[in-house]
Image (cartoon, helix red, strand yellow):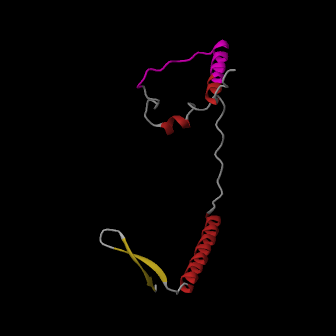
Amino acid sequence: MSKDQSFKALQREALQRKIDAYLAKGGHIEKVPPGVSGVPEGGDWRRSARGSAFTPGSPRKPEVDRTPLTRVMATIDARKQQQRQKQQRQKNRVRLQRREPRRKLIYDDFGEPLRWQWVDE
């Protein structure tokens, strides 16, 4: 009984099959020596992205106008602020209701527990 292959091994085999199919169709793989940078000659990625370096022969799509969302964001922020205020009021209400004494552990100078004491806070 053989052990099942791991997901990583299956992925590795699938990738190797794709590479072999690419090479069989006439493709080639260029080996790049270590230490060579991928930055274009001018040193600016944005300049090469505007050109045809990253578009495979298709014309560039026109830029789409964006709809400003300032009002939507302001509405969302106002809702969040209302929720925070509501939560704060609930916390204050709970604090006001808790007026009964409670037990507090008193420690000595060395951090050892000494005794319990009832405190009003």
Which residue sits at x=47%, y=29%?
38
Up/down of 63 relative to 96, above or below: above
Give the percent coordinates (x, y) of residue 60: 64, 37
Which residue sits at x=44%, y=84%?
119
Residue that lies at the very extreme toward the right in this rendered image: 1
Asked which quadrant contains residue 83, the reply is bottom right
Asked which quadrant contains residue 24, the reply is top right
Residues 112 and 91: in front is 112
Q: Is residue 47 left or right of residue 67?
A: left
Residue that lies at the very extreme toward the front in this rendered image: 115
Boundaries of the magenta span: 13-35
Q: Is residue 6 left or right of residue 43?
A: right
Queried whether the magenta region covers residue 29, the answer comes back as yes
Give the percent coordinates (x, y) of residue 68: 63, 60
Queried whether the magenta region covers residue 9, the answer comes back as no
Residues 45 and 52: in front is 45
Give the percent coordinates (x, y) of residue 9: 62, 25
Residue that lies at the very extreme toward the left in this rendered image: 109
Residues 45 and 22: in front is 22
